[in-house]
Image (cartoon, rainbow, N blue to C red):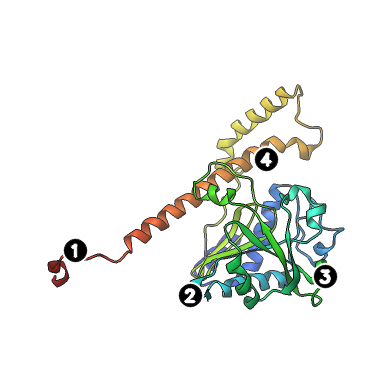
Amino acid sequence: MAQRGLMNLMSAFLYPGDLVSICKERWERVQKQRQQPAKPTSKATSPTNVTDDCPPFPTDGHLLELLQTVYHLSFLAEEGRRVAVRVIYVLPHTFEHCRSLNLSQKPARLQRPVPVSVGELLKLAPAVQATESAIMIAPAETIKTGPAGKLMIWGVLHLGTEWWNALTAANSAAICPPNCLTISSFAPGAVTISTLGFAIARLRNGQLIGAPLPELDEGPIGSFLGSTAQELYRDTAKALGRKRYARQSDSDKHPLQLYYRTLARLLHLVREQETRRYAARLARRTQPRRWTSRRQIID
């Protein structure tokens, strides 16, 4: 039933409002794989609720606002140039309370945080290299300034170029970006929602493209990969001098989870690289023909 609904969505034009439920569902799937169930509620903005087991996630209203803002910004230009932007939903205290979210970078805070809007992002985005950094967004309550209930731009997070270089095949390995909701746009009408460097939803020309890879430990694929995963588990336990990797059932599955997660990352990188190669070939084919002789012009 859910698959049929997704097919119906993909056959019609989609807009940011259509992505809210899709993002929530896929975000939960990613966090479940990490055994860190996220709770997309307003309570997640409290320091006592944002922990390693609960990455920050916006309310439905805030998520819609972020999607719409980035989407509309993608059609604008600054001084004749298209604007590329990447925003990340991260709270100030997350850097202190959530060590496992890959937030080792030190944020650069704005002296005067400003409310999220297309205009404010249009001013800031050209000064922030979207392939290297992200504009940090958080509710006003968490940064203790701004109108209540309003999303605020409160700083810039430098992420480096390792992951971007890995996606473009410039590097063969990289540290994953933070486990925080990230929304980016590099072309008109193109919006990518991701976490940990994995795209959980991508909107292109009004269509949802590049659906996430299926669970690698389920179905025929899971049956094919299962024997290798179990062999890895046995070898790991043997190397540790144990019969089981860990006593707790959740921790005991860690070698298997790491195995499937690594495969998923490799497949994701391959797909991204193939997409970029195809786009490059298409761009070359659509270049205007250059006339080399007068006869060609006449013909």
Q: Pointer 3: what residue?
A: 141
Q: Nearer the viewer, residue 153 or 33?
A: 153
Which comes before the other along the chain, label 1 or label 2?
A: 2
Q: Position of residue 277 (x, y in %)?
A: 42, 52
Residue 138 appearing in the image: yes
Amino acid type, label 1 = Thr
Q: Position of residue 263 (x, y in %)?
A: 58, 41
Proximity of marks 3 and 4: CB atoms separated by less than 8 Å: no
Q: Position of residue 180 (x, y in %)?
A: 70, 57
* Vertical relation: 148 (above or below) 105: below
Q: CA distance from mark 1 to mark 4?
A: 58 Å
Mark 3 or mark 2, whichever is nearer to me:
2
Q: Pointer 2: what residue?
A: 80
Label 1: few (<14), some (14–19) or many (≥20) C-alpha neighbours in 10 Å: few
Q: Pointer 4: what residue?
A: 257
Q: CA distance from mark 4 to mark 2?
A: 47 Å
Q: Nearer the viewer, residue 14 or 291?
A: 291
Which comes before the other along the chain, label 4 or label 2?
A: 2
Q: Extreme left residue here?
A: 295
Amino acid type, label 2 = Gly
Q: Pointer 1: what residue?
A: 292
Mark 1 or mark 4, whichever is nearer to me:
1
| Apparent side of residue 60 relative to residue 187 in the rendered image (left or right) | right
Which comes before the other along the chain, label 1 or label 4?
A: 4
Label 2: few (<14), some (14–19) or many (≥20) C-alpha neighbours in 10 Å: few
Q: Determine the secondary structure under disc 2.
A: loop
Which comes before the other along the chain, label 3 or label 4?
A: 3
Amino acid type, label 3 = Glu
Q: Determine the secondary structure under disc 1.
A: loop
Label 4: few (<14), some (14–19) or many (≥20) C-alpha neighbours in 10 Å: some
